[in-house]
């Protein structure tokens, strides 16, 4: 795919300069001499080039870029043998894991068509997804364990823009998505760095309040949802800026509105209904309803994409259990935009959500997270997947439950109750 020159972009190219600055300085907090791996769709090259330049201006060692392409991805699903789908480039992920172990930072750009695989055979999509998840585990573990500083930002790709704004002409759709990305990422402020500092302070106050409460579990009540989520022993709430195990404070997600922690994989009971669609590996999954017993999903259905969802749940033993619980006010800028982005990075930050699969070992107090056995003993889940889906709305109430059974309002009608 040919990329556009700056004067051909249907939005102000200066905004990409701002986004690159925020990503490198706030998102990654890249350190002098630190290497960086960037992955991105070819379409996002205008941003990739700016990120590389900004990284080098901030003293980066070596910036390595890895580009993907939608047409190349489709070629595999349309023409490859079934046996090919059972393979994945494990050598690449082992190399990335080695790089992360050697203090290389990680930056990913989200821009691809969210429904790229919607027309493909769900069994082939699931087959390839499982092999990719298994192969990616060495690198994914370094990210979920927060071994290095990492960041993800977005670029307004055309196919994505047309999903969000289907009634607009191509350039108008890209311009509208760009405006939304820049606003929600807080780079349309006069001083984006200062705006992020203020936002991080708000998220820090929320996580500090939750850590002070030290709840034993959370009870969710909304239409279709009556769910009690036990929290892992020694859990710690995180949000906004956090310090990776290499000692570098970074903000992994831009945008981010959440505070999150690790649930207890064996102490989840009740029902949950998704409040927004989930896009997983190019397939739209909508109308999700599940029932948990002893931490495990024992009944699941979806109005759309059910076959893909059920195959996702069968990825491994941990795929039917929770690895993350996250709180987001309904009034977040993403929710206030009224847009469905078909992109988990955005849609999860519009709504309270839960994640199936692997837990974040950084969400523990003390040195629990440094020991996989200790994480498991505390209730942390293990899986080859980590998939977020949204259950929050303006009808959601959440109570925090202490070990003695006392209840404290956490959210009422989707907003923070204690604030």
Image: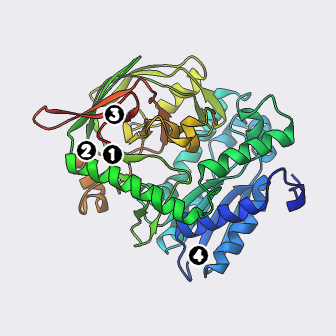
Q: Are marks 4 and 3 in contact (CB under 8 Å)?
A: no
Q: Nearer the viewer, residue 77 or 80?
A: 77
Query: Which residue: 50% across, 22% down?
Result: 288
Q: How is the image coloured?
A: rainbow
Of badges 4 and 3, nearer the viewer stands: 3
Q: Are marks 2 and 3 in contact (CB under 8 Å)?
A: no
| CA gap, disc 2 and disc 3 | 20 Å
Mark 1 or mark 3, which has the lower sequence index? 1
- Tally of marks: 4
Reading the image, the residue beneath label 2 is 232
Task: Give above or below for 386 relative to 290.
Answer: below
Coordinates of residue 187 in the picture (x, y in percent): 63, 57
Q: Are marks 1 and 2 in contact (CB under 8 Å)?
A: yes
- Secondary structure type for disc 4: loop
| CA gap, disc 1 and disc 2 | 6 Å
Query: Which residue: 44% across, 46% down?
Result: 258
Coordinates of residue 88 in the picture (x, y in percent): 63, 50
Coordinates of residue 334 in the picture (x, y in percent): 56, 40
- Secondary structure type for disc 2: loop
**Left or right: 197 as drawn, with respect to 214:** right
Within-10-Å neighbours for mark 2: few <14, some 14–19, many 20+: many
Q: Which mark is residue 262?
A: 1
- Secondary structure type for disc 1: loop
Mark 4 or mark 3, which has the lower sequence index? 4
Reading the image, the residue beneath label 3 is 411
Mark 2 or mark 4, which has the lower sequence index? 4
Q: Nearer the viewer, residue 264 or 49?
A: 49
Q: Which mark is residue 253?
A: none
Query: Which residue: 50% across, 58% down?
Result: 252
Within-10-Å neighbours for mark 4: few <14, some 14–19, many 20+: many
Q: Which mark is residue 35?
A: 4
């Amino acid at each position: 795919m040919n990329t556009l020159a700056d004067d051909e972009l249907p939005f102000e190219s200066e905004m990409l300069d701002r986004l690159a600055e925020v990503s490198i300085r706030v998102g990654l907090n890249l350190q002098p001499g630190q290497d960086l791996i960037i992955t991105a769709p070819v379409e996002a090259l205008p941003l990739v080039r700016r990120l590389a330049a900004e990284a080098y201006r901030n003293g980066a060692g070596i910036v390595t870029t890895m580009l993907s392409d939608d047409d190349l991805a489709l070629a595999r699903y349309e023409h490859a043998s079934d046996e090919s789908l059972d393979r994945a480039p494990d050598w690449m992920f082992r190399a990335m894991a080695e790089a992360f172990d050697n203090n290389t930072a990680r930056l990913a750009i989200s821009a691809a068509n969210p429904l790229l695989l919607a027309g493909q055979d769900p069994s082939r999509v699931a087959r390839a997804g499982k092999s990719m998840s298994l192969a990616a585990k060495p690198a994914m573990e370094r990210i979920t364990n927060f071994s290095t500083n990492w960041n993800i930002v977005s670029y307004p790709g055309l196919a994505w823009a047309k999903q969000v704004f289907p009634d607009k002409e191509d350039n108008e759709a890209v311009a509208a998505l760009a405006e939304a990305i820049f606003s929600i990422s807080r780079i349309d402020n006069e001083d984006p760095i200062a705006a992020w500092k203020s936002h991080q302070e708000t998220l820090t106050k929320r996580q500090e309040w939750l850590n002070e409460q030290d709840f034993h579990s959370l009870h969710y009540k909304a239409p279709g949802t009556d769910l009690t989520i036990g929290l892992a022993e020694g859990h710690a709430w995180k949000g906004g800026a956090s310090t990776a195990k290499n000692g570098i404070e970074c903000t992994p997600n831009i945008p981010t509105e959440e505070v999150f922690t690790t649930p207890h994989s064996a102490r989840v009971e009740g029902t949950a209904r998704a409040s927004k669609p989930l896009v997983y590996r190019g397939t739209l999954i909508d109308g999700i309803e599940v029932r948990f017993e002893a931490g495990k999903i024992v009944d699941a259905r979806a109005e759309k994409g059910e076959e893909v969802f059920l195959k996702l749940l069968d990825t491994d033993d941990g795929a039917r259990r929770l690895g993350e619980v996250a709180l987001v006010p309904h009034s977040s800028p993403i929710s206030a935009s009224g847009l469905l982005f078909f992109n988990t990075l955005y849609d999860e930050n519009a709504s309270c959500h839960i994640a199936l699969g692997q837990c974040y070992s950084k969400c523990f107090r003390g040195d629990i997270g440094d020991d996989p056995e200790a994480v498991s003993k505390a209730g942390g889940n293990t899986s080859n997947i980590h998939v977020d889906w949204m259950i929050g709305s303006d009808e959601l109430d959440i109570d925090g439950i202490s070990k003695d059974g006392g209840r404290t309002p956490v959210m009422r009608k989707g907003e923070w109750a204690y604030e």
